[in-house]
Amino acid sequence: MRILLTNIKELLQVRPTHIDKISGSDMAQLPVLTDSYLLIHNDLIADFGKMSDLPDSAFDQKINCEGRVVLPTWCDSHTHIVYAGSREKEFVDRINGLSYEEIAHRGGGILNSAKKLNETSEEEIYNQSKKRLEEVISQGTGAVEIKSGYGLSVEGELKMLRVIRRLKENYPLPIKATFLGAHAFPTEFKENHKGYIDMIIHEMLPKIAAENLADYIDAFLETGYFSVSETCQIMEAGKKYGLRSKIHVNQFTAIDGIKACVEMEALTVDHLEVVTDEDIEALKNSNTMPVALPSCSFFISIPYTPARRMMNAGLPLALATDFNPGTTPSGNMNLVVATACIKMKMTPEEAINAATINGAYAMGISDSHGSITIGKKANLIITKPIDSYYQIPYAFGSNLIQDVVINGKICN
């Protein structure tokens, strides 16, 4: 099947030569081709260029993109899409003045979601989760990472990871599974951290590896949750099973967790609402991608990741949603890009780079996704007619997407 997109007003993220990620001042540069065409052959990008150079070749379908912008689909590298129920009562509690920590101490937060998940059948969790996945695809997400972490028991974590595997099998976009057993300490292990970490390492991990259920391993490295030394134990155990780390860190406090993650060769460090000069130094010249989650900051009214300071120091940055029932009940990457521009003062170019090529790097798929490059997967957003790509973050409350293409097929 050969599909030709013609008269594209702006073709974004055009990278004739493959790159893994973009850092520092380079993030302000977004390659754009105006009045262009793009050829899809089966599920891959086969060719692109200026309309004036359109080759005379056969195709099966032609789509006129006059007035429209075409760009790679969003790569959302941090989500918790698989969960049961919702936590809107906690939303009201925060409005009434309770903090995230206070809600957690009252049995809410992650433990609340764990209770609901363990009481819900695997089939029902799948049915709830697939609706969320279909929604984010319609909003332009063409690759997604999904974490476990609401089981907090051997069977609960396996149940979540099996649901993620089923989503992988039934939907065409790349889905990466991350094992997050170290999301919180269950009530029965509140005073026995070693006991729960032993369960993660000696009971959960071997069973997860036996069923090949995870691509990555994660932990909530934070004051009151998992300490630096506890997280290092978990990262080291994951390595033995071939699971590279993607770690929640520096959401509320800075306790030298980023340095430890870099030393352990973590693929990503996520949240980073609190960042010290020492953290920035630790990230310099590393292969660890910082990931910001601005819609989480927006929803629970905490500081935003200091993107400008980090990019000025030469660091890369990725953007993701943190889609979860407690602190970010939205998987809309368009809102994430807009919030990064509005609240983090990222330029549209920086935000789009962070949500496409750097998001792909943060999932380990930048060789096949995240840019307009011949040979990469044809996962594309085609907007409605708009004035320019600046409208994507500017018109933050509008749905500007006309079509979403996954593996060369329009899926909406």
Image: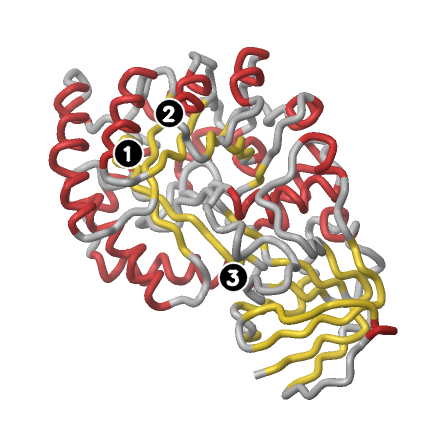
**Disc 1 marks which amino acid?**
Lys
Q: Quadrant of the N terminus?
A: bottom right
In the picture of the structure, the residue carrying the numbered disc 1 is 239
In the picture of the structure, the residue carrying the numbered disc 3 is 137
**Disc 3 marks which amino acid?**
Ile
In the rendered image, the vertical position of residue 45 relative to residue 321, given as above or below: below
Taking the spot 66% from the left edge, 63% from the top edge, the residue there is 401
Taking the spot 56% from the left edge, 69% from the top edge, the residue there is 44
Direction from residue 402 to residue 129 in the image, left or right: left
Q: Nearer the viewer, residue 11 or 337?
A: 11
**Disc 2 marks which amino acid?**
Met
Label 1 crowd bin: few (<14), some (14–19), many (20+), radius 10 Å:
some
Instruction: Give me the C-alpha separation between circle 1 and circle 3.
Output: 31 Å
N-terminal of the two: label 2 or label 1?
1
N-terminal of the two: label 3 or label 2?
3
Mark 2 secondary-structure assignment: loop
Residue 24 rendering spot, x and y as whole percentages = 69, 30
Q: Which mark is residue 264?
A: 2
Q: Nearer the viewer, residue 112 or 349?
A: 349
Instruction: Give me the C-alpha separation between circle 3 and circle 2.
Output: 33 Å
**Labels 2 & 1 near each other (Cβ < 8 A):** yes
Residue 326 rendering spot, x and y as whole percentages = 41, 38
Mark 3 secondary-structure assignment: helix
